[in-house]
Amino acid sequence: MNYEEVVVELDHVIKSSEKVAVSVFDKLELALSYTKEKESSDLIMEVMNTIQEEDIFRQKLERVVNCICEAQGIDGSRFNIAPTAKHISGDKYDDEISQEDIDKMFANINK
């Protein structure tokens, strides 16, 4: 599998993930509007937070795809992926994928 094929596969995963997350989020918002019970509302909010965590994973995939495209000279615009997000100064992210991790992934592909 070459880099472009990897990017195409990751792009499909990103798009599918985003569609599912949006659909679930919309349904949960509707359910939240119907419920008056505290336990149900708390559970729905907990699920919504989990979906937001999934969105962070999607953003990480987008960053990897953007790095592969840039490093390999692949035209990433055809995938319609958002440019790599920049964090606001002072924000702390313990689970952020580092450039070193991305470089290791490139090295493993080349094996």
Image: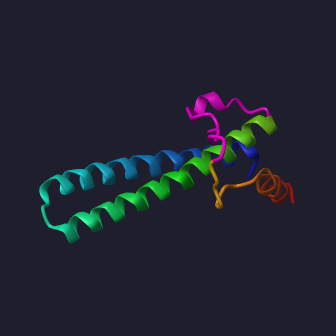
Foreground residue, 41 or 62? 41
**Does 13 appear in magenta?**
no
> Which residue is at the front of the view, 87 or 77?
87
Which is more toward the observer, 63 or 105?
63
> Quick check: 92 left or right of 1?
left
Residue closer to the observer: 89 or 28: 89
Residue 75 drawn at (x, y percent) = 70, 29
Taking the view exactly as shown, the residue that stands out farthest to the bottom is: 39
Per the picture, the main secondary structure of the magenta-coloured stretch is loop
Q: Is residue 74 magenta?
A: yes
**Going 82% across and 52% down the picture, which residue do you hit?**
103
Q: What segment is highlighted magenta in the picture?
A: 73-90
* Count of numbered circles in the view: 0
**Residue 47 placed where, x, y %?**
35, 63
Q: Position of residue 3 (x, y in %)?
A: 75, 45
Q: Is residue 53 left or right of residue 19?
A: right
At horizontal 62% and vertical 39% (from top left) the residue drawn is 85
Quadrant containing the C terminus is bottom right
| Location of residue 109 in the rendering, given as x and y in whole percent from the top left corner | 80, 56
Q: Is residue 20 left or right of residue 37?
A: right
Specify whether 4 is left or right of 26.
Answer: right
